[in-house]
Amino acid sequence: MATIGLIGAGHIGSQLARLAIAHGYDVVISNSRGAETLAPLVAELGPRARAATPSAAAAAGDIVVVTIPLKAVNTVPAEPLNGKIVVDTNNYYPQRDGHIAELDNESTTTSELLQRHLPASKVVKAFNHIYAAELTSHGQPKGSPNRRALAIAGDDPAAKRVVSEMIERFGFDVVDAGPLKEGWRYQRDTPGYGPRRTAEELRRDLAAAKRYRDMHSNV
Ligand SMILES: NC(=O)c1ccc[n+]([C@@H]2O[C@H](COP(=O)([O-])OP(=O)(O)OC[C@H]3O[C@@H](n4cnc5c(N)ncnc54)[C@H](OP(=O)(O)O)[C@@H]3O)[C@@H](O)[C@H]2O)c1
């Protein structure tokens, strides 16, 4: 089974680590303060988990998840991620991240910013529209009635297939929102951001999503 590298070990990073371990993956997890601060989490996760620096987690992962405050994405080590699948969970909260002009004027999207920082990686946007606690409580076996769906977006079809298989294994249906530039369809404040949705409901929400500029105008 593959190794999941995690850059970020907070609400989402720790939950994804638990999910990954529960489904047979190895995990290498990192944060900004140093591997020693992750000792309690690693003890909880067991022998298939270890803590490392962000660069070492990036190097170790077959799939690497970036799950940190958006303002820090330019610190993500690029070189060890060359050629790799990078899952981006990040959302833009200006009160936390500071204002980023290109996001404020909607000339780009959060995951496209990470893709630009990691030009040789295959970025897939996923897990940004589910609350951390629900990652380990909302999964169900394939075929369960009203199974929850999660959206993905990305420009590399093979990377999307690998991430879809992982999400399916974690207990969720997958809805493909299209290329990375369509990732805004499940960004903060869109209908599909947060609530539990089946695949059919999520597809409807993605289609109904509006850009911020259109939400805030009366047109
Ligand atoms: N919380 C949710 O339910 C949720 C749901 C979906 C998406 N998201 C998004 O996912 C991202 C992570 O959210 P979160 O709630 O997990 O955040 P969080 O609990 O604040 O955790 C952030 C993690 O990132 C690490 N970090 C910060 N700067 C770093 C850097 N430069 N290099 C490496 N690691 C760094 C932190 O490590 P230290 O503690 O050592 O600084 C911490 O482990 C955010 O963009 C958030 O908007 C959150």
Image (spheres, rainbow, N blue to C red):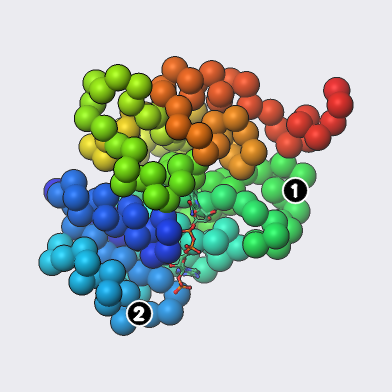
Check disc 1 and report the residue beneath it: 104
Residue 131 seen in the current view: yes
Check if mark 1's residue and mark 2's residue have beta carbons within 8 Å: no
Which mark lies nearer to you, 1 or 2?
2
The Cα atoms of the two marked residues, 1 and 2, are separated by 35 Å
Whether the residue under disc 2 has CB within 8 Å of ligand 1: yes
Q: Position of residue 54 (x, y in %)?
A: 38, 70
Check disc 2 and report the residue beneath it: 37
Location of residue 144 by image quarter: top left
Identified at 56% across, 65% down, the residue is 72
Q: Is residue 38 above or below residue 209?
A: below
Q: Is residue 135 left or right of residue 51?
A: right
Amino acid type, label 2: Thr
Identified at 56% across, 25% down, the residue is 206
Mark 1 vs mark 2: which is more N-terminal?
A: 2
Circle 2 packing at 10 Å, graded few (<14), some (14-19), many (20+), is few
Identified at 69% across, 28% down, the residue is 210
Location of residue 47 by image quarter: bottom left
Q: Is residue 84 left or right of residue 113?
A: left
